[in-house]
């Protein structure tokens, strides 16, 4: 499989496949394809279906198979970027639960729970994330623009909840309470921030969709 990411604010990834190659997606994100691509929908068993629903993904998975040299394109659902991740045994990634777009068939998608109680109870979007493992290329969606940092062992980055798009599986995640009563009441930054600790790469997004929804909610008419 070879691919090309195209577009600006609403990007797509065009994947060119040879006979027998397969792609998976869980969002119905296919936007166009050649006629020699076939689709099969699979739940992957009751256990996997439950875990997918719990992590915010669809319980079903669409598997596209090339019957000859073919092309399939997956589109972003929100203004931002599409990022490619190369996976292999021992090289795994953790991403926000809505980030997964599509991947080669050899990529596995599972739930990632934060082990620390603080991140679990107060981390918001950081509580349940998705783990990408296996072998192959996976594509994830980034809300808005992308910033990438490489953290050294023990080096930390404090991030507003929702701006964490993903990170290497070697990075640990926890939460930190905003200090000071005035800061909490009048700072507008919420009660907690996310703390990422290296070593490993982290990917931060500039325009989380939840922030966009909150900003336009006051302008949506209510009632009759």
Image: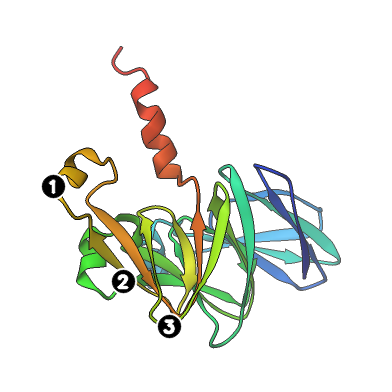
Pointer 1 with pointer 2, Cβ within 8 A? no
- Which residue was labeled with disc 1? 181
Q: Residue furthest left?
A: 181
In which quadrant will I find the N terminus?
Answer: bottom right
CB under 8 Å between callouts 2 and 3?
no
* Image height of 7 relative to 98, above or below: above
Q: Residues within 10 Å of mark 3 (few under 14, many from 20)?
A: few
Please name whichever residue, 83 or 147, is drawn nearer the observer in this view of the structure: 147
Q: Residue furthest top?
A: 224
In the picture of the structure, the residue carrying the numbered disc 2 is 114
Q: Residues within 10 Å of mark 1 (few under 14, many from 20)?
A: few
Disc nearer the start of the sequence (2/3): 2
Rounded to the nearest angstrom, the CA distance separating label 1 from label 3 is 32 Å
Image coords of residue 40 (percent x, y): 62, 62
Please identify, in this view, whether the residue under mark 2 or under mark 3 is nearer the observer. Answer: 3
Residue at image mark 3: 153
Q: Secondary structure at mark 3?
A: loop
Comes first in the chain, label 1 or label 3 = 3
Question: Which residue is rendered at x = 63% and y = 60% of the image?
Answer: 83
Does label 1 or label 2 sit earlier along the sequence?
A: 2
Is there any visible trace of residue 33 in the rendered image? yes
């Amino acid at each position: 499989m070879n691919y090309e990411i195209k577009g600006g604010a609403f990007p797509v990834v065009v994947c060119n496949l040879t006979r027998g190659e397969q792609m998976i997606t869980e969002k119905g994100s296919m936007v166009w394809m050649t006629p020699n691509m076939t689709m099969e929908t699979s739940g992957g068993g009751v256990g996997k279906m439950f875990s997918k629903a719990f992590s915010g993904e669809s319980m079903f998975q669409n598997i596209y198979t090339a019957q000859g040299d073919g092309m399939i394109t997956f589109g972003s659902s929100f203004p931002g970027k599409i990022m490619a991740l190369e996976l292999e045994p021992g090289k795994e990634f953790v991403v926000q639960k809505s980030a997964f777009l599509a991947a080669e068939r050899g990529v596995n998608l599972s739930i990632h729970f934060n082990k620390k109680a603080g991140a679990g109870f107060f981390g918001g979007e950081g509580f349940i994330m998705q783990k990408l493992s296996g072998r192959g290329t996976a594509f994830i969606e980034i809300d808005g623009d992308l910033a990438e940092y490489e953290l050294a062992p023990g080096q930390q980055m404090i991030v507003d909840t929702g701006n964490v798009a993903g990170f290497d599986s070697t990075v640990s995640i926890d939460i930190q309470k905003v200090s000071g009563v005035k800061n909490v009441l009048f700072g507008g930054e919420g009660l907690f921030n996310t703390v990422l600790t290296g070593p490993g790469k982290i990917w931060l997004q500039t325009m989380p969709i939840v922030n966009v929804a909150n900003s336009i909610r006051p302008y949506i008419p209510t009632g009759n």
